[in-house]
Image (cartoon, helix red, strand yellow):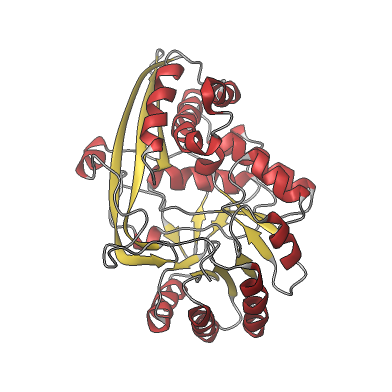
Amino acid sequence: MEIAEIHHWLVRAPFSIPVEWGSGTRLGTTRLICRIRTRSGHEGWGETQCLIDSTPAAFGTAAELVHGWDIRNVEGFHRLILGAGYYHHQRAAVYAIAALEMAMWDALGRALGQPLWALWGGKWRDEVRATGYVFASDPAEARRQLQLHADRGHEAFKIKIGMGADSDIALTEAARQEVGSADIRLDVNGAWTRPTAKRQLARLAEFAPNWVEQPLELSDLKGSAELRGQPIPIVLDEATYTLSDVSVALDAGAMDAALLDPHQAGGLWQCIKAAALCEAQGVPVGLHSGGELAISQAAYIHLAACIPNMTIPIDTERAWIGADVSPEPPALRDGGYAVSDRCGLGVDIDEALVEAIAVDKIEGAYLDAARPGWFPTKPSY
């Protein structure tokens, strides 16, 4: 089951809306797609988020090292890449590792005739619930997006805030008025200082959000631990990339819940291990969305199907993605995804669709073309 061929593409799918958040405006999602073939003829596909130029560069290094690697040895592959110089630069390597590791799992599942959830302990749930994700700086637009999500059956909603103190309140108030008592999660993306966080949490309490996500800059675990005394539970995301990040955050008592991401963790197996760390301490988890196309979305569903403490509806941006690499990507129905019993990831990829959205560089991941000279700071207010 050794890897004989590796091909990869950089692709960008447009968003149907301007994705507004505290770090700028995104007009599309850039992803790195890869396909591997083993010497025995088995094929596997992988995908990862591609925000900065280090990801394609690290992928090239990883692809050279993994040629001839046995696809059954995913733990060894992860450690191989770290050992090649990335132990002290893990965040530069995790995205690249994740694409190849996902393809290895897909090929292995296909070779064994088993869905991935069956290789990871079995199917804990038959349906994976998802959040309705809102990206808007204007409360009226936020309400429009919330109504669209509610019409599609979502029962939990995530709203990007972190664009200004008064804007935080206006967007949250609009959301609560629109969705009634439904679950609301507010994503600050590390925009608040510690004093601002204390003031904003007190102001937001009347709207009873279920969670506030990444209120402080990612390295401020002490501050996050102090905020847990407030009435609104704290979720960490940017602070919980790798397995060691999750362990440190748990030891610091910095979170009530974690949003994991296999691309940021360096692979699906690393994500499962991180979830187990959280489970041992009674911490629920969900999945962060970075604009997944069909391959990663299928992987998310398999993860959520088999992780018992993944009780937070997973993030998804499917409503806003205008192109894909599969003619039949995972379908979002009534606010959730059915868990597939097909082998591997259970999704078919059309190379012509991949080529149709192929690009040669990363654009629009951060900043805002409409505001020349502007850039975000963390924290910003």
Q: Position of residue 207 (x, y in %)?
A: 62, 83
Quick check: 363 left or right of 62? left
Quick check: 82 left or right of 227? left
Identify the residue at the far front of this view.
373
In the foreground, 237 or 300: 237
Residue shown at 26% from the left, 67% from the top: 370
Position of residue 157 relative to residue 175, above or below, is: above
Q: Position of residue 62 (x, y in %)?
A: 44, 24
Quadrant of residue 213 in the image?
bottom right
In the foreground, 37 or 241: 241
Position of residue 122 relative to residue 2, above or below, is: below
Q: Is residue 371 visible?
A: yes
In the foreground, 153 or 10: 10
Q: Position of residue 371 (x, y in %)?
A: 29, 67
Residue shown at 53% from the left, 87% from the top: 177
Quick check: 180 left or right of 225? left
Residue shown at 69% from the left, 55% from the top: 221
